[in-house]
């Protein structure tokens, strides 16, 4: 016999947890279903632990910058405080009791297990069947993809789920995939002493970002001693019990450990969405402005394909909560999605890249400036390289995209995220006062370059 509730949330990633808790707090009968840990990938295997690693490697880099600028410093990396912080402070040793309690204390009912959509408004978890009066919210997230390379399956490679639990830095690390995960982890491990090689099939690392961002990070990686192989096709992987070998068209690469960071996907068939009339063979779940995938079924987070970020999951959760509670609010708008790659220097971007704007055949003007040419860059001196790149819609006179790559790039981005989101006229941006001598004052120079 099915048990009737108001809402069933399947997958409690950042957005699912938030929506389930808020709907329960609003007095609805909510069942939250999670097969692993409440909170999802972000707090246990992704954003938070990896940014603690980045914080560690940034500190090492900053310590090394003392030399020649403010005295002498010798920095000796030690991974153990980083590993301990991740275990004790970030993940509570990968225990979600606090998150489960937070949800149940709001009146939610928690079910640990793998939920499967078994009909319109129906979810089955093991031998329990739930039927939702208002609907189902799907927040299943994504799993790391292991590319179909001969020999890879069955080897003890790492994904993000293993690398956050590492207690010792290996002597060498091969990174398959030079996207965000690959780039962030490559730099961390190199700065903690591993010999790192990034193997990327595309013709540049961070290929979704501006080419200038890829070039800046490639140059920094060279200084960090990280080898980059782009346009690389791995035909076979082997592991002899001690080391991995990647077989490429033009030779072999060996390393003690292998991180596979080659993208992510969701198994929509296993989620059973066909039973609710949705397409199980698609890569993502199609949603409307209110995140509705169909009558009585919503989807949020990575699975919607609108940007695999925690802030996206939370943004979408907010809209779903309003929709379910019949509250006023605007539909989703993806004009100004910000993203930050936490390498050093950071790559912050929002909206469209130049290539995306050209693909859409928008009439655009480009404005750029180098951060090292700004007064703050001059003062900063060591590792001051970076740039601001603006994409202006020439007819609208507003920015449709921007990148800030450089020291604190992700923080400086905030000003440009507001400009793109609020469609602030470029004329207004030119008339603003920018504090001297900040990095963000360089926005003025990039605006002047728009022509
Ligand atoms: C290494 C790494 C670093 C990242 N760093 C950042 C960052 O710095 N900033 C940022 O914004 N984003 C970052 N991300 C992306 C971010 O982690 C995700 O976008 C974020 O977790 C939101 O995902 P989600 O809401 O789709 O669900 P997820 O966080 O993926 O959670 C989904 C949950 O659903 C559960 N689940 C799935 N199917 C079922 C089912 N059938 N039944 C029950 N439970 C189910 C899963 O166990 C999981 O716990 C990073 C990702 C990675 C891999
Ligand atoms: N700072 C952040 O906000 C942050 C950090 C990490 C991850 N994320 C999110 O997680 C998502 C997943 O990250 P990711 O880095 O795993 O995926 P990704 O899709 O960003 O990058 C994967 C990379 O692997 C390459 N690749 C794929 N198959 C390959 C193969 N066989 N050989 C060599 N290279 C191969 C791709 O060309 C691509 O460059 C990101 O898109 C991002 O949205 C965000």
Image (cartoon, helix red, strand yellow):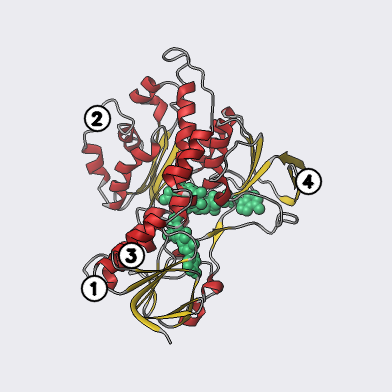
327 in relation to 252, above or below: below
Measured in 3D between alpha carbons, the distance from the residue under mark 4 to the one under mark 3, in whole angstroms, is 48 Å
157 in relation to 267, above or below: above
The answer to whether residue 100 shows anywhere in this view is yes
Q: Are marks 2 and 3 in contact (CB under 8 Å)?
A: no
Q: Depth-wise, is mark 1 or mark 3 nearer the camera?
A: 3
Q: Depth-wise, is mark 2 or mark 4 nearer the camera?
A: 4
401 in relation to 226, above or below: below
Which image quarter holds the C terminus?
A: top left
Horizontal and vertical percent position of residue 199: 65, 44
Measured in 3D between alpha carbons, the distance from the residue under mark 1 to the one under mark 4, in whole angstroms, is 59 Å
The answer to whether residue 312 shows anywhere in this view is no
Q: Give the labeled residue for mark 4.
A: 240
On screen, residue 68 versus residue 102, left or right, reads right
Q: Give the labeled residue for mark 2.
A: 435
Q: Depth-wise, is mark 2 or mark 3 nearer the camera?
A: 3
Measured in 3D between alpha carbons, the distance from the residue under mark 2 to the one under mark 3, in whole angstroms, is 47 Å
Disc on the earlier residue, 1 or 3: 3
Q: Which mark is residue 104?
A: 3
Q: Depth-wise, is mark 1 or mark 2 nearer the camera?
A: 1
Disc on the earlier residue, 2 or 3: 3
Disc on the earlier residue, 1 or 4: 4
Nearest to the observer: residue 412 or residue 193: 193
């Amino acid at each position: 016999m099915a048990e009737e509730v108001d809402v069933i949330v399947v997958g409690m990633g950042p957005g699912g947890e938030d929506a389930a808790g808020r709907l329960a707090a609003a007095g609805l009968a909510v069942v939250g279903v999670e097969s692993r840990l409440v909170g999802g990938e972000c707090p246990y295997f992704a954003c938070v632990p990896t940014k603690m690693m980045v914080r560690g490697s940034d500190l090492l880099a900053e310590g090394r910058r003392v030399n020649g600028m403010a005295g002498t410093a010798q920095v000796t990396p030690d991974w153990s405080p980083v590993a301990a912080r991740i275990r004790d402070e970030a993940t509570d040793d990968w225990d979600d009791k606090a998150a489960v309690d937070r949800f149940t204390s709001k009146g939610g009912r928690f079910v640990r297990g793998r939920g499967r959509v078994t009909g319109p408004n129906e979810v089955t978890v093991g031998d329990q069947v739930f039927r939702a009066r208002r609907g189902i919210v799907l927040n299943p997230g994504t799993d790391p993809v292991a590319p179909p390379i001969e020999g890879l399956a069955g080897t003890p490679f790492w994904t993000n789920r293993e690398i956050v639990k590492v207690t010792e830095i290996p002597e060498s690390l091969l990174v398959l995939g030079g996207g965000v995960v690959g780039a962030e982890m490559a730099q961390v491990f190199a700065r903690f002493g591993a010999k790192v090689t990034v193997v990327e099939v595309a013709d540049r690392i961070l290929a979704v970002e501006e080419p200038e961002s890829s070039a800046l990070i490639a140059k920094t990686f060279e200084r960090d001693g990280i080898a980059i192989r782009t346009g690389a096709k791995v035909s076979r992987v082997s592991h002899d019990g001690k080391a991995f070998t990647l077989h490429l068209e033009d030779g072999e690469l060996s390393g003690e450990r292998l991180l596979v960071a080659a993208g992510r996907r969701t198994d929509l068939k296993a989620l059973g969405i066909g039973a609710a009339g949705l397409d199980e063979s698609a890569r993502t779940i199609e949603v409307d402005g209110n995140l509705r995938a169909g009558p009585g079924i919503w989807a949020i987070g990575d699975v919607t394909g609108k940007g695999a970020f925690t802030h996206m999951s939370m943004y979408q959760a907010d809209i779903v909560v309003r929709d379910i509670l019949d509250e006023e609010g605007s539909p989703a708008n993806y004009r100004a999605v910000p993203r930050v790659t936490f390498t050093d220097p950071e790559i912050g971007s929002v909206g469209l890249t130049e290539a995306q704007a050209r693909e859409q055949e928008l009439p655009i003007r480009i404005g750029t400036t180098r951060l090292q040419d700004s007064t703050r860059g001059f003062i900063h001196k060591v590792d001051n390289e970076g740039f601001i790149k603006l994409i202006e819609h020439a007819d609208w006179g507003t920015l449709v995209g921007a990148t800030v790559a450089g020291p604190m790039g992700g923080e400086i981005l905030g000003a440009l995220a507001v400009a793109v989101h609020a469609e602030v006229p470029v004329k207004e941006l030119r008339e603003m006062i920018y504090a001297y001598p900040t990095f963000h004052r360089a926005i003025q120079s990039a605006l002047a370059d728009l022509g």
